Image (spheres, rainbow, N blue to C red):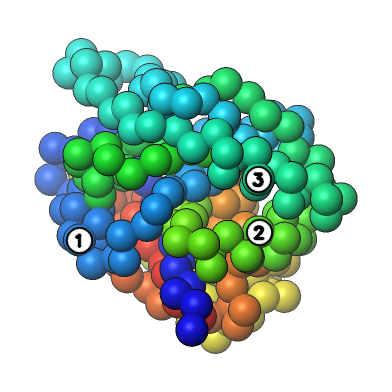
């Protein structure tokens, strides 16, 4: 019987989760000990959106500091696992053979990848690389990308789709890190949980019309887009919520796992 690894959607937050009193970093640390040990990690991060899908074929992953205005210590952190060029090229080949353009790039890990990975696998001893989101792709297109990549789950590969369950940075800073959830974020967060628990693909893919306060929680789609690739890699679409937290009043740090 094949050992099929799960697919995960996480809300990665900013590097400040490492010491801001929220629960996400501790969740990631625990998650890394609970999952089957993968032979490689592919991270689909909201922070890489070129015009077409791309994979990083670098043999070693540099740490990309794609954030601004944080204390200096966050720019001194290093996370440099080996890459996996052969698997990256295979990932691109699968997509290209399926009619979805995917190119190769020399690129390291942005904070949507290295912040959670640093917590999950602190020894940086698991080969890792990134698959980008295609800029402007619809949820249905990203779902199709995920479907094409299902077979990777049977090869000991952990796919982490890294975004944010809610992500309205226009309201960020109005509330403390640990505070009561703002109703509009809580409402969308609960809707997302219910839809994933029921495997409601059509409603999820049409979230802008189906979800409460969708535009308020996602003024731009970048941070929810990784979820649709994870959804596409699942047979049933049913996901279990494995982390439940709304930080800074408005940023859901929810995480989900597809185990089918």
Residue 99 in the image: state x and y as whole percent.
87, 50
Q: Residue furthest right?
A: 99
Tell me the element at label 1: helix
Determine whether label 3 and label 2 are within 8 Å by CB.
Answer: no
**Is 172 positioned to the left or the right of 144 in the image?**
left
**Mark 3 burial class by Cα count in 10 Å: few <14, some 14-19, many 20+:** few
**Mark 1 burial class by Cα count in 10 Å: few <14, some 14-19, many 20+:** few
Residue 33 at least partly seen: yes
The mark nearer the N terminus, 3 or 2, is: 3
104 w.r.t. 232: above or below: above
How far is mark 2 from mark 1, CA to CA? 25 Å
91 w.r.t. 207: above or below: above
**Mark 2 burial class by Cα count in 10 Å: few <14, some 14-19, many 20+:** some
> Which disc is residue 90 wearing?
3
Tell me the element at label 3: helix
The mark nearer the N terminus, 2 or 1, is: 1
- The mark closer to the camera, 3 or 1, is 3
Residue 220 at least partly seen: no
How far is mark 3 from mark 1, CA to CA? 28 Å
Residue 89 in the image: state x and y as whole percent.
65, 38
**Which of these two is toward me, 110 or 212?**
110
Going 28% across and 33% down the picture, which residue do you hit? 15
212 w.r.t. 65: above or below: below
**Which of these two is toward me, 183 or 237?**
237
The mark nearer the N terminus, 3 or 1, is: 1
**Is 19 positioned to the left or the right of 39 in the image?**
left
**Which of these two is toward me, 260 or 223?**
260
Residue under numbered circle 1: 33
**Is 28 positioned to the left or the right of 89 in the image?**
left
């Amino acid at each position: 019987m094949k050992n099929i690894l799960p697919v995960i959607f996480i809300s990665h937050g900013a590097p400040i989760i490492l010491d801001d009193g929220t629960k996400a970093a501790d969740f990631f640390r625990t998650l890394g000990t609970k999952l089957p040990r993968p032979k490689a990690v592919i991270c689909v991060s909201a922070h890489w959106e070129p015009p077409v899908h791309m994979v990083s074929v670098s043999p070693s992953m540099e740490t990309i500091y794609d954030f601004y205005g944080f204390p200096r210590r966050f720019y001194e952190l290093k996370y440099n696992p080996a890459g996996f060029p052969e698997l990256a090229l295979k990932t691109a080949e699968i997509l290209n053979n399926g009619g979805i353009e995917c190119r190769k790039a020399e690129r390291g890990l942005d904070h949507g990848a290295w912040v959670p990975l640093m917590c999950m696998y602190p020894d940086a001893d698991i080969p890792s690389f990134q698959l980008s989101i295609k800029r402007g792709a619809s949820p249905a297109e990203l779902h199709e990308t995920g479907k094409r990549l299902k077979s990777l789950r049977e090869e000991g590969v952990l796919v982490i789709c890294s975004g944010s369950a809610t992500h309205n940075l226009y309201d960020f800073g109005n509330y403390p890190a640990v505070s009561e959830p703002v109703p509009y974020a809580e409402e969308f967060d609960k809707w997302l949980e219910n839809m994933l628990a029921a495997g409601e693909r059509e409603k999820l893919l049409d979230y802008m019309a189906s979800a409460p306060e969708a535009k308020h929680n996602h003024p731009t789609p970048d941070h929810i887009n990784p979820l649709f690739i994870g959804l596409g890699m699942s047979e049933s679409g049913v996901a279990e919520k494995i982390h439940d937290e709304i930080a800074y009043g408005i940023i859901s740090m929810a995480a989900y796992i597809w185990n089918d």
